[in-house]
């Protein structure tokens, strides 16, 4: 009788230890690998269109080129209403005529929301900046709204220029208005010119 009680206690202790260990493992896994808000495709979905050397231009009501998307290749998936891009390159013209470029290794456009999600080595920079105004913005994931021309991310952002280096968690960049908001944990290092 005492032996059965001892075995039951031992089994309950073992079960509790395994449950806590599994819970801790799951908690650590979720903390290290947070979900990324990227549209996903069904593995069984087939592309209905394959394109190479894609160039898509969008003009304003006045007939001025406002943005251009190019990519080395693209695949459209009709069931998920999305298009995958390789080496996407976006050129956007601001309200005052300045141009910015956004480059990445991969991109995916959500056709319903008019949003392009760029991933892997995303870089944003002005084209032909004035002297001492050249900056480079780098992140791993960026959402670009093709209607509003606003680029946003909640990922780590690094901004470098001739005299400064800025790190932040999250960014909102309005290219038409030429405004940038850094969201969290902003750390700046400034070196005055000599």
Image: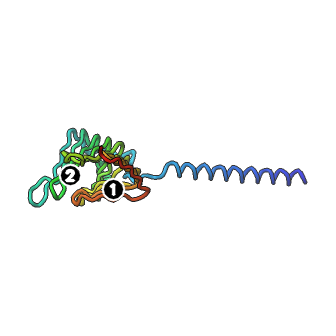
Circle 2: is it few (<14), some (14-19), or many (20+) Cα within 10 Å?
many
Q: Residue extending furthest front?
A: 194
The numbered disc on residue 141 is none
Which residue, given by chain and number where applicable, does mark 2 sit on? 92
Question: Is 153 or 164 nearer to us in this picture?
Answer: 164
Question: In the image, is residue 48 above or below residue 60?
Answer: above
Identity of the residue drawn at 16% across and 54% down: 66
Taking 70 as reference, is 64 left or right? left
Identity of the residue drawn at 28% across and 47% down: 135
Identity of the residue drawn at 85% across and 54% down: 5
| Quadrant of the rendering where the N terminus is positioned | bottom right
Which residue, given by chain and number where applicable, does mark 1 sit on? 152
Do callouts 1 and 2 mark residues in contact (Cβ within 8 Å)? no
Identity of the residue drawn at 16% across and 57% down: 96
Q: Position of residue 100 (x, y in %)?
A: 22, 49
Q: Position of residue 3 (x, y in %)?
A: 88, 50
Taking 44 as reference, is 81 left or right? left
Question: Is 51 or 91 nearer to us in this picture?
Answer: 91
Give the tally of numbered discs.
Answer: 2
Q: Earlier in the sequence, mark 1 or mark 2?
A: 2
Alpha carbon separation for disc pair 1 and 2: 15 Å
Q: Is residue 171 visible?
A: yes
Secondary element type, mark 1:
strand
Q: Position of residue 111 (x, y in %)?
A: 27, 55
Taking 95 as reference, is 4 left or right? right
Q: Is residue 161 visible?
A: no
């Amino acid at each position: 009788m005492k032996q059965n009680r001892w075995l039951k206690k031992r089994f309950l202790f073992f079960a509790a230890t395994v449950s806590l260990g599994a819970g801790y493992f799951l908690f650590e896994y979720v903390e290290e690998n947070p979900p990324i808000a990227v549209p996903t495709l069904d593995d069984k979905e087939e592309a209905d269109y394959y394109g190479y050397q894609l160039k898509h231009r969008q003009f304003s009501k006045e007939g001025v080129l406002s943005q251009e998307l190019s990519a080395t290749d693209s695949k459209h998936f009709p069931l998920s209403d999305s298009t995958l891009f390789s080496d996407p390159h976006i050129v956007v013209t601001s309200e005052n005529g300045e141009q910015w470029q956004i480059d990445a290794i991969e991109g995916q456009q959500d056709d319903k929301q008019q949003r392009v999600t760029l991933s892997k080595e995303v870089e944003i920079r002005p084209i032909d900046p004035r002297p001492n105004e050249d900056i480079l913005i780098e992140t791993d994931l960026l959402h670009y709204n093709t209607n509003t021309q606003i680029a946003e991310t909640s990922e780590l952002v690094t901004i470098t220029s001739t005299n400064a280096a800025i790190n932040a968690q999250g960014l909102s960049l309005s290219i038409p208005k030429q405004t940038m908001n850094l969201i969290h944990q902003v750390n700046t290092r400034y070196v005055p010119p000599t």
